């Protein structure tokens, strides 16, 4: 536990922890010495010459005062370490979030990450003050008492020395059992928290399909599993806890019986026996509280382990000597890709892309079409290096994306996603994220190209309209236009639009198609397109099926070739919307 705290805090954060450990250890030993001094004090008081009490009493009071000073320092030190822990952990987690590959952030891991950064950091920050300090006392004070007992009665001290390993073994056995059970319960609680979150977030969908809490199976199952883990913890963990408590009482009874028999045979005086019993009661108390704080320490240790695991995740590899893209072209050569789904078994996963090779010449427009699930969004992600290709090479401006610094690549590639996320702020703030220093002219151009200018005109607060968390106060089409304007304002030479026109109405979609076409004069465009107007005007169309490029060419060439594209064209040409879907099998 202490080792883990040092690891998490790092060298810079370790000083307050060192100080707290030294102060608390000193206080714990002094507490033990103060209790031990009660023996001569009691012996003198109960004995024949009560004047002997003064030197012992003076030493006792001195010890108590010194203890109070050290303990005060340790208490304030515990809080200092706690706030240091929270600061260091939050900063390290934020740094780690920046360094981890985007592919790492699956829904489950994102939920775990926010749980760790929120409630778990708060839980860990109270550990030094409320658990570690009492735990140190509950170990060092009894140890001091055992050593002190040697000065009063060697036999009692030897019995204690023999019993200590037995108590320790029982405690260890119960701790490791509880730790395993705690881990199982922590996982069950985490799963329930995720399902409750999912259940809350997806209320609109669940209500639309008439699902109530009882009818929502995943949440139900998670709550049942959590209750089962709780019952398992009580049923299997209780014997361990009870056996420890029983063992400590047994040791006490044994020493009491021995003490009485030694008193009866005249080898132990009554005052010493009484004073030793006071020490024993204190000793048993301390050992029992060690067991109680041990439970809290176990939970904190599990949490620290989970935090360390996230902090130790290998960051996305960055090039040692970064190169700069030479132009705005893009090249995929023999690219293969598998999602690892959070496991190390990448090789076992089904390939999503297979031997994908294509080139996007500078200032050209390519439409990527294909049935749902064919791998179009995956290609966009590889181009922006959200993940690395499992096979082959992705090049931007003639340079392997793995050799380009993250900032440089981000400056070259702009993306408009299917799922638009807006930050809680005004429309202007959301667009300006792309280029905080952009002038009003640039902002207006981006708004005009994306159709955002008309949205601004309709809204009473215009650019200053608050969008709400995630953009909840705007319609889907409005959100999308903000997102497109944002991508256009960034003015990166390569623009990837993933289903960007899906939420636009027909009139706006046509305007947008025209704007996109105009953009080709300045940018390299990859449009994951579903609309005919966009696809037909592309310089090159790539048809992706089952992760492989099955056809490529211009609209005319592909229609003439009479393949998959032509068949879909035939079927869809008359429809208002155009969507390439898997044909009947
Ligand atoms: N994070 C992920 N983990 C595992 N598999 C994934 C992940 N994301 C996508 N996939 C799988 O990869 C395949 C390709 O998905 P992708 O989103 O690239 O397809 P798409 O062509 O963009 O589909 P759509 O047109 O429906 O958006 C699908 O089978 C999908 O289930």
Image: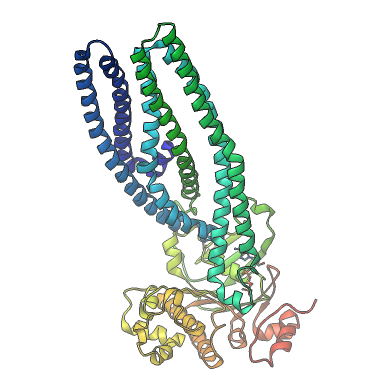
Q: Residue at x 41, y 79 (%)?
A: 467
Colour mapping used in the image: rainbow
Locate the N terminus and report the quarter of the image it occupies. top left
Task: Locate residue 380, reporting x and y percent.
Answer: 56, 69
Residue 99: x percent and y percent? Answer: 45, 55
Q: Nearer the viewer, residue 422 or 236?
A: 236
Place of residue 460 in the rendered image (x, y in percent of width and height, measured from the top left): 36, 90
Is residue 376 shown above or below 10? below
In the displayed structure, does residue 62 sit left or right of residue 567?
left
Q: Where is ligand 1, by quadrant?
A: bottom right
The answer to whether residue 144 is visible is yes
- Position of residue 197 measured from the top left corner of the image (x, y, whole percent): 53, 65
143 is higher (above) or lower (below) than 429 = above
Left or right relative to 269: residue 166: right
Q: Nearer the viewer, residue 260 or 68?
A: 260
Q: Quadrant of the C terminus?
A: bottom right
- Say which residue appears at 44% left-offset and 40% top-offset: 4
Q: Is residue 308 left or right of residue 339?
A: left
């Amino acid at each position: 536990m202490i080792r883990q705290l040092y690891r998490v805090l790092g060298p810079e954060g370790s000083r307050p922890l060192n100080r707290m450990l030294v102060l608390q250890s000193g206080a714990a030993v002094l507490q033990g010495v103060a209790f031990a001094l009660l023996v001569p004090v009691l012996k003198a008081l109960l004995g024949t010459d009560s004047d002997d009490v003064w030197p012992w009493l003076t030493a006792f009071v001195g010890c108590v005062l010194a203890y109070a000073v050290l303990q005060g320092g340790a208490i304030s030190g515990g809080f200092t370490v706690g706030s240091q822990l929270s600061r260091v952990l939050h900063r390290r987690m934020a740094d780690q979030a920046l360094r981890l590959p985007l592919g790492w952030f699956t829904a489950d891991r994102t939920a775990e990450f926010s749980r760790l950064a929120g409630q778990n950091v708060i839980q860990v920050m109270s550990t030094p003050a409320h658990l570690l300090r009492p735990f140190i006392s509950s170990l060092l004070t009894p140890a001091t008492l055992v050593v002190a007992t040697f000065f009063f009665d060697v036999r009692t001290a030897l019995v204690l020395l023999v019993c200590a390993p037995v108590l320790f073994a029982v405690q260890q056995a119960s701790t490791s059992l509880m730790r395993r059970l705690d881990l199982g319960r922590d996982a069950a609680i985490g799963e329930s928290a995720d399902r409750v979150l999912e259940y809350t977030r997806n209320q609109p969908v669940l209500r639309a399909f008439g699902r109530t809490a009882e009818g929502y199976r995943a949440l139900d199952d998670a709550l049942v599993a959590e209750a089962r883990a709780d019952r398992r913890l009580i049923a299997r963990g209780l014997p361990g806890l009870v056996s420890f408590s029983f063992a400590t009482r047994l040791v006490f009874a044994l020493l009491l019986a021995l003490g009485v028999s030694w008193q009866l045979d005249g080898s132990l005086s009554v005052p010493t026996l009484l004073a030793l019993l006071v020490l024993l009661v204190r000793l048993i108390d301390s050992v029992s509280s060690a067991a109680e704080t041990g439970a809290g320490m176990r939970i904190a240790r599990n949490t620290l382990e989970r935090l360390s695991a996230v902090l130790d995740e290998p960051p996305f590899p960055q090039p040692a000597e970064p190169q700069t893209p030479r132009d705005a072209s893009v090249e995929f050569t023999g690219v293969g890709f598998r999602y690892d789904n959070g496991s190390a078994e990448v090789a076992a996963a089904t390939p999503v892309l297979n031997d994908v090779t294509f080139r996007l010449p500078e200032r050209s427009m390519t439409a990527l079409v294909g049935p749902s699930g064919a791998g179009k969004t995956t290609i966009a992600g590889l181009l922006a290096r959200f993940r690395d290709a499992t096979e082959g090479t992705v090049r931007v401006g003639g340079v392997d994306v793995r050799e380009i610094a993250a900032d440089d690549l981000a400056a070259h590639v702009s993306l408009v996603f299917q799922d638009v996320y807006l930050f809680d702020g005004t429309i202007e703030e959301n667009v300006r994220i792309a280029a905080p220093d952009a002038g009003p002219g640039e902002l207006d151009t981006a708004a005009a190209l994306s159709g955002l200018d008309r949205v601004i005109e309709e809204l009473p607060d215009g650019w200053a309209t608050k969008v709400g968390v995630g953009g909840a106060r705007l319609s889907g089409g409005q959100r999308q236009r903000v997102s497109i304007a944002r991508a256009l304002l960034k003015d990166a030479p390569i623009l990837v639009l993933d289903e960007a026109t899906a939420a636009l109405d027909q009139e706006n979609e046509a305007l947008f198609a025209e704007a996109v076409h105009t953009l080709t004069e300045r940018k390299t465009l990859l449009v994951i397109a579903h609309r005919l107007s966009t696809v037909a005007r592309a310089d090159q169309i790539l048809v992706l099926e089952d992760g492989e490029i099955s056809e490529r060419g211009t609209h005319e060439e592909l229609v003439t070739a009479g393949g998959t594209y032509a068949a879909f064209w035939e079927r869809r040409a008359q429809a208002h919307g155009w969507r390439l879907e898997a044909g009947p099998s």
